[in-house]
Amino acid sequence: MTKVLNAHDISRLIDMPAVIDVVQDAYKEKAMKTGEIWPMIYHAFSDMADMDIRSGALQPKHIFGNKLLTWFGNNAQQNMPELNGLVTLYSSETGEPTGIINAPALTGYRTGAAGAVASRVLANPHSNTLLMVGAGGQALYQIMAQLCVLPEISTVEVYDPMNHENAEKFVDTAKKRLVELFSHDIQAYEAVVAEKIEKRLSTVKFVAVNALDKAVAAAQVIVTATPSTKPLIKAEWVQAGTHINAIGADMEGKQELDTAIFAHANVYVDDLEQATTVGETQNPIKDGTLKKENIQEIGEVLAGQSVGRQDDQQITVFDSTGIALQDLEAANLALQRAVEHNVGTSVEL
Ligand SMILES: NC(=O)c1ccc[n+]([C@@H]2O[C@H](COP(=O)([O-])OP(=O)(O)OC[C@H]3O[C@@H](n4cnc5c(N)ncnc54)[C@H](O)[C@@H]3O)[C@@H](O)[C@H]2O)c1
């Protein structure tokens, strides 16, 4: 039998702290070569519609599989979601499909978790101010994940490069939406985690900012999640000791950071080839500010094969482009809990 899990099942079954832990496993498995990723397939149907397929295998979990995610940008005009897709998991012992899972619901969690894994090993653990650049679909997931790993963050500043009013609206409802998304839905199966999340959120203040230079200078941790194609953050604004998670660039031509930032930063990526082709690091590689041999994969730091932050003055940057192992780990977590709690629909294919 194959389990089918929809978006509602996912939000009831998985919690952000658990996804952060399994995404950490995913990066580590890649470094230890017990997790492998296969070449990505990307196809653009038009300027406003594309799809990609990411696939791979996780030996320790005895699974392999893929995520096919579509983006149809005109769907919003018809009140339909822009992102659609499926994660399909298989047993690597029998080849049988074990799960068919809603992909957009998992993507937010695993992308938020990516930034959190990096902050856990690279950011100053006493950071008190987080700057979120971008107030779109990914922002709530990024903020929740950072709050899970950085216990002293008490101010979250939100900047929207396109529309300050949107940032104001975002912060007005942020706490309520975070509680709904990350606590209410998991009450039934993860009541203790739900309670911890609500308690954590009660200690945080959300502020909309419109002077990006001042906000960058005031933050110890910065997350960028926009589809920008021009640098938003200038090198001279970034203070010593800052950690930046660059999440938005995942296609050729995207850019959120001034390449000069990379001249003095310690740089980490999820996958060296992918990140330097389509991630934020494509830009400093192109203009010669950064060389591939000076970039480390985050999994190597987690596996003890290379070093992370060495002093509190270093500027660190993590460039995330998204790898299949994150999706497989998050899907596997959802599937295990679905079996345990008898959630979802079992089908004979
Ligand atoms: N690294 C990963 O694994 C991963 C995963 C999912 C999404 N992403 C990427 O993250 C980015 C953000 O995704 P989202 O769903 O939150 O996007 P979104 O469209 O919901 O908007 C994000 C924010 O960016 C702003 N924005 C829009 N166009 C802009 C532009 N040209 N320049 C600067 N700001 C702009 C919006 O006003 C909004 O505040 C996208 O580029 C997406 O492809 C990366």
Image (cartoon, rainbow, N blue to C red):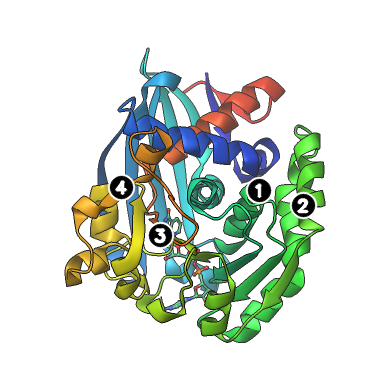
* Callout 2: SS: helix
Amino acid type assigned to the residue bearing label 1 in the image? Cys
First in sequence: mark 3 or mark 4?
Answer: 4
First in sequence: mark 2 or mark 4?
Answer: 2
146 on left or right of 317: right
First in sequence: mark 3 or mark 2?
Answer: 2
Q: Which residue is mark 4?
A: 296
Q: Residue at x 68, y 29 (%)?
A: 343
Q: Which residue is mark 1?
A: 148
Classify mark 3: residues with Cα within 10 Å, few (<14), some (14-19) or many (20+). many
* Callout 4: SS: strand
* Contact (Cβ within 8 Å) of mark 3 with mark 4: no
User: Which of the two residues, 36 or 126, is positioned nearer the viewer here?
Assistant: 126
Amino acid type assigned to the residue bearing label 2 in the image? Arg
Q: Which residue is mark 2?
A: 200
Amino acid type assigned to the residue bearing label 3 in the image? Val
User: Which of the two residues, 242 or 161, is positioned nearer the viewer here?
Assistant: 242
Q: Nearer the viewer, mark 4 or mark 1?
A: 4
* Contact (Cβ within 8 Å) of mark 2 with mark 4: no
Classify mark 2: residues with Cα within 10 Å, few (<14), some (14-19) or many (20+). some
Work out whether 117 lies above or below 153: above
* Contact (Cβ within 8 Å) of mark 1 with mark 2: yes
State the CA–CA distance, disc 3 to disc 2: 26 Å
State the CA–CA distance, disc 3 to disc 1: 19 Å
Q: Give residue 336's quadrant in the image.
A: top right
* Callout 1: SS: helix
Any part of residue 41 in sight: no
Q: Which residue is mark 3?
A: 317
State the CA–CA distance, disc 2 to disc 4: 32 Å
Q: Position of residue 144 (x, y in %)?
A: 65, 54
